[in-house]
Image: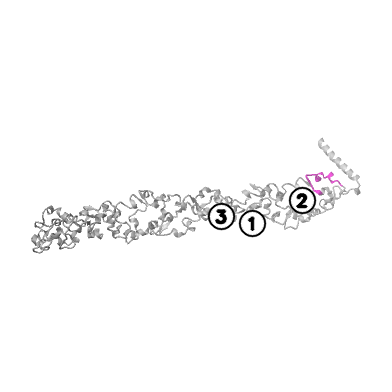
Amino acid sequence: MRRYCSYGAFILCCIVLVSAFLLVISPQDVSAEDMDCAMCHPKKAKGDVVHPAIFMGCASCHTNVDAKKFPHDFGGTSYGLAAEGSDLCVMCHDPGMFSGEKVVHMPVMGGMCTSCHDPHTSSNSKLLLSDNICFNCHDQSSFEDKSMHPPVAGGMCTSCHQPHQSPNAQLLVSEPPELCMMCHDSSIFTKSTVHMPVAGGMCTSCHAPHASPMEKLLLSENICFNCHDSSQFSGKRVVHAPVAGGMCTSCHDPHSSEQGKLLQAEGLCFNCHDKSSFEDKNIHPPVAGGMCASCHSPHQSDNAKLLVSEPPELCMMCHDSSIFTKSTVHVPVAGGMCASCHQPHASPMEKLLLSDNICFNCHDSTPFDKKTVHAPVAGGMCASCHNPHSSNQPKLIDKRDICFECHDLEKFSKSVTHSPVEAGECLLCHNPHATDEDKLLLSENICFNCHDSSQFSGKRVVHAPVAGGMCMSCHDPHASDADKMLDPDIPRLCGKCHEKKEFMRRDKHAPAFIGMCMFCHEPHQSREAKLLTDAVPALCYECHRKSKFKSKNVHPPVQTGQCMECHEAHSSDYRDILKGNNLNLCTKCHPSVRNEPHAGVASGHKLSSNKRDPKRKGRPFSCTSCHNPHSSNSPKLYRYKADTNYDLCNYCHKKGQSK
């Protein structure tokens, strides 16, 4: 109780002293200019920031204060101020700073300077009432979020906004994008391709200027869809992973780029895709040209691999469709399976093939690995015969006469052509890939596929080449200028095996002389020796008049059909293609003729003389001068009609002559 009494006494004492002081001072001597206001209002003159007017004297603002009175008389004005509101401030401050622009801050417009500024002192710059003065009016929660604009986070509102007035909306110190470039590097926004909002200075169409729950102060998670149609980026079967993850800026620069479509870089795709998979000896031209989007949709597609369309339609966007749509189409092509043979990006193989033996991915390699392999097959050159895509020929053969691309057509175009060759049916005889037979023949006895084998076997004598299956030793299998496709023509053909001198002696059998071997011989097989077309002498009678050999008396060799006992078949050094001269030949069977006089006279005929035949001009005198070697109606095979030796002699010797 005593404590409170002492405090009251102290207050009373102070009042008395002040009253006495005021009574002592003369009213004429006291004015607002002379008063030391700080004696009573010390806090109005002390602070980190002091209004310069304080140093000019309180009366510079409070001109209407009657300092004679206590409490002071303000002369009907607020705090004795010389003017109300902003009118007071503009007594010192340039009024042009607070009016005349398009946008004026509402407190300024209302003359409410002290709603933001302390007129005397403040601990904040610009005499602001607090360091967060803006939040006295603006909702602070609108400026606080996960991501905050650094100037906002640092309380630097006036780095972007004019506090009093501005020619720009929102009191901005300048229009975007110039405003933004006061802090952000302008080169980011001024590349050759500029995002439309950036070009239009519409930064806040994407970014919140103060704070946002999103990274980069974005207005929303899917901000791109505010302008871009979202249906272009979702709803299809395959969506590009960055698109599905809302990672637009992993591919696109949101502000500007030196690339088309605002792409981040020229080789953008390789940021995710391994570049080595796209580099090799052979590169698909779109890949080499960086034209990934010519085949792939960058955002979404209803096709696998984000392809813009399904193969083969995709491939035909560049490749001529007529190549793929002929009457016979390769199964992978018909099924749109281009990538089953070709790498779509790069390959070490020609034509972007998956491997050097790509055909064997589908075709069994066994039929191609035999004793004799077609040269293109052995060299892996399947496409030298087959069109890998489509053809108007069966088996995808590139053209009808494909064989003549390598084989000389002239050899197949002679006067006589093998019927399969003429019909273009090479495969009737040959396997086009590989076989265990020479010449790629389908089988060892390929000829018998068409020709009746019974015509070439089963008889007693078979021509050696026929027996050995060596048809081509006599016949050209494709074409020839000789009949029966012989190569060469008879008799040169026969001379390839048969000794030529057999046919080249002085006196030649007429058929042999004119090359008519087939008059007497079968070329393939026969029931007769020497492949004769018939047995001797029936064969000989084909040309020689049979009646000459069928007279009353027949020479025994002739009678038994032993023509070859006396005659050579082809040629001889002796007349009438005999095997020797008449004397030697006859004496093989008639040896006594040599050792006794002949013709029944003592002297006899000298058979070995050089006499000429008196009845047959040009012939030597010999056994056949008197005897027919084949047959005769006279005894002893007399050449002329006679019953006795003497009757015969009269044909040459006149009666009474001895010689």
Q: Quadrant of residue 518?
A: bottom left
Identify the mark at residue 550; answer none if there is no mark.
Answer: none
Q: Earlier in the sequence, mark 1 or mark 2?
A: 2
Q: Which amino acid does label 3 sit on?
A: Ser
- Which region of the structure is painted magenta? 35-52
Q: Nearer the viewer, residue 495 or 258?
A: 495
Q: In this view, does 636 lie above or below 23?
A: below
Mark 1: few/some/many CA within 10 Å (<14, 14-19, 20+): some
- The answer to whether 32 appears left or right of 538 in the picture is right
Q: Nearer the viewer, residue 424 or 256?
A: 424
Kindly tell me whether residue 253 is visible in this rendering: yes
Label 3 sits on residue: 230
Q: Which amino acid does label 1 sit on?
A: Ala
Q: Are marks 2 and 3 in contact (CB under 8 Å)?
A: no
- The answer to whether 41 appears left or right of 469 in the picture is right
Element class at badge 3: helix
Tell me the CA gap for discs 1 and 2: 40 Å
Label 2 sits on residue: 114
The picture places residue 173, in percent across and down from the top left corner, at 71, 54
Q: Nearer the viewer, residue 445 or 29?
A: 445
Element class at badge 1: helix
Label 1 sits on residue: 199
Q: Which of marks 3 and 1 is nearer the N terminus?
A: 1
